[in-house]
Amino acid sequence: MFDESADVTSRESGRVVCLAFVIALIALAAISGTASAHQWQDTVEKDQYRLGINSNPERPVAGVETTFVAAIGPTETVSDGHSGDLTDQPVTVDIVGPDGSHTHMTTQIPADDPHFTFAHTFLTNGTYELTVTTMADGEPTSFTTTREVQLLPTTASGGEVTALRAEVASLRQSLRTTQLLAGIAAFLTVTSTGVSVFFHLRGLR
């Protein structure tokens, strides 16, 4: 005898699987788009190597901690197809302020990831010089870039406040995108588990 309820349940489970598959494709497309859109805010070349560096916020604010993410790799593709990015290396960072103040810090490039991070709180506004130094081909290699540090909104001019508000809005949008992707990933995990349990229980009948 044909079990209509079982057929309906089967169709519903099929829809769940299809929905999970579609959501997975959307999540993968979003992640892929985010990765392909990634670009360094600044790049500095020295000899055969290039430093790529980003700061968050992109326009640092005096008195607010700024986080930097960077990576160092060759200016040309390595012949064996590997990226050639430097890993498992100590890094020193020297920051010189507009008043001549000097901050020295150290960090480490991980063994399994070419990206390294460091953070700094700029005390005053103005142009700061950042020099990143590490070993490349057995020789110390330095890369120098700058960051223009802005005043806090309470003391900034009208134009600077507008620019800071725009950047805050951009950061909030990035955060919402990150939270959305995390939510999709969690949903996929729960959905996949539910579908697996459903088919397991059907198999036990």
Image (cartoon, rainbow, N blue to C red):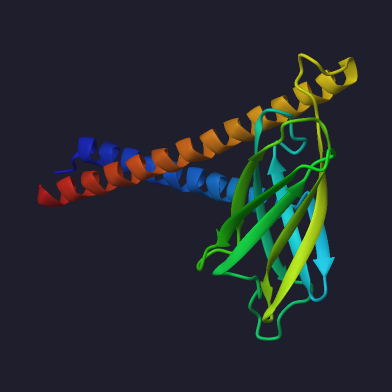
Left or right? Give the position of 184 relative to 147: left
Residue 29: percent from the left, percent from the top? 60, 49
Farthest bottom residue in view:
80
Regarding residue 11, the answer to whether it shows in the image is no
Residue 150: percent from the left, percent from the top? 80, 29
Q: Which quarter of the picture shows residue 124?
A: top right
Residue 109: percent from the left, percent from the top? 57, 63
Residue, x 74% and y 35% (percent of image)? 60
Residue, x 76% and y 14% (percent of image)? 154
Position above or below: 149 against 164: below
Left or right? Give the position of 189 relative to 108: left
Viewer-closest of 187 and 8:
187
Viewer-closest of 104 and 160:
104
Residue, x 73% and y 29% (percent of image)? 62
Regarding residue 147, the answer to whether it shows in the image is yes
Position above or below: 193 against 89: above
Task: Tell me how many marks there are.
Answer: 0
Residue 130: percent from the left, percent from the top? 77, 51
Image quadrant containing the N terminus: top left
Residue, x 40% and y 38% (percent of image)? 187
Viewer-closest of 18 and 152:
152
Farthest left residue in view:
205
Left or right? Give the position of 163 relative to 20: right
Viewer-closest of 84 and 105:
105
Q: Which quarter of the picture shows residue 139?
A: bottom right
